[in-house]
């Protein structure tokens, strides 16, 4: 069993191929960008902001997907394979030893599906933190908010482009840093 490192949280946001009118026959949604930000737990500082472009293996980037994410087929054609991206997370970020976080369950489920379907080793350990649920509970909200709504609720500006993994991971890490700081502040009283 791998040891767990609690010094940093790996905040991840994925973008995947998508369509406005359903999945075309013969295609399956593929991750095309993995946004990563490391959050230093002790200081609340966000570090190592990165977007890993991933070449889709079972689908192509639709016009709708480009409109949503700004990513084109040409952009992701120059990316790495999904298996290489997963190996990179393990080797460069020690993702299998760290708590990792995302906004909701979509990112975790997409990784699980794609790893299973392609026979790729899952790059993370068992400790996933759903920041969407945590944010809603801490703020006693009656329902979970989307990331943009939560940023507004928290009084934080959107930094970068919404639906770009690199920017969304950065923004999610900022909200998680605020939640951790508030928890430490409450515990100190």
Image (cartoon, rainbow, N blue to C red):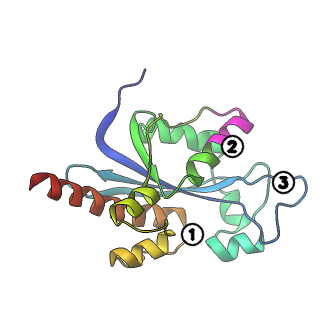
Mark 2 and mark 3 in contact (Cβ < 8 Å)?
A: no
Task: Read off the residue under disc 2.
Answer: 114
Instruction: State whether residue 45 is above or below residue 129.
Output: below
Please, which residue is most extreme toward the front here? 142
User: Which residue is found at the position 71% from the left and 60% from the top?
Assistant: 17
User: Number of callouts in the render?
Assistant: 3
Instruction: State whether residue 83 is above or below residue 53.
Output: above
User: Which residue is found at the position 26% from the left and 55% from the top?
Assistant: 180
* Quarter of the N terminus within the rendering: top left
Task: Read off the residue under disc 1.
Answer: 163
Magenta-highlighted residues: 112-120
Task: Read off the residue under disc 3.
Answer: 27
Q: Position of residue 174 (x, y in %)?
A: 34, 64
Q: In which quarter of the image is residue 99?
A: top left
- Label 1 environment density (alpha carbons within 10 Å; few <14, some 14–19, many ≥20): many
In the foreground, 162 or 71: 162
Q: Position of residue 20 (x, y in %)?
A: 77, 72
Please, which residue is most extreme toward the right here? 25
Q: Where is residue 70 in the image (x, y as percent from the top left)?
A: 63, 73
- Label 2 environment density (alpha carbons within 10 Å; few <14, some 14–19, many ≥20): some
Secondary structure, mark 1, is loop
Secondary structure, mark 3, is loop
Q: Can residue 73 be seen in this view?
A: yes
User: Which residue is found at the position 75% from the left and 64% from the top?
Assistant: 61
In the foreground, 79 or 66: 66
- Label 3 environment density (alpha carbons within 10 Å; few <14, some 14–19, many ≥20): few
Can residue 147 be found in the magenta stretch?
A: no
Secondary structure, mark 2, is helix
Q: Can residue 160 be seen in this view?
A: no
Q: Where is residue 138 in the image (x, y as percent from the top left)?
A: 33, 61
């Amino acid at each position: 069993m791998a040891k767990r490192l609690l010094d940093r949280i790996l905040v991840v946001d994925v973008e995947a191929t998508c369509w406005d009118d359903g999945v075309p026959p013969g295609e399956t949604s593929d991750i095309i960008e993995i946004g990563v930000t490391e959050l230093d737990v002790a200081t609340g500082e966000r570090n190592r902001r990165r977007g890993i472009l991933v070449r889709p293996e079972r689908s192509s980037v639709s016009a709708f997907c480009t409109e949503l994410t700004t990513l084109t087929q040409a952009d992701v054609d120059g990316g790495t394979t999904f298996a290489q991206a997963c190996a990179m997370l393990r080797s460069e970020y020690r993702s299998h030893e760290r708590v990792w976080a995302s906004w909701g369950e979509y990112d975790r489920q997409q990784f699980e599906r794609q790893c299973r379907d392609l026979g790729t080793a899952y790059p993370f350990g068992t400790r996933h933190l759903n920041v969407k649920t945590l944010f809603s509970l801490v703020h006693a909200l009656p329902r979970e908010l989307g990331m943009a709504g939560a940023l507004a609720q928290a009084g934080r500006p959107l930094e970068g482009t919404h639906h770009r993994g690199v920017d969304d991971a950065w923004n999610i890490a900022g909200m998680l840093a605020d939640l951790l700081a508030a928890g430490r502040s409450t515990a100190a009283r």
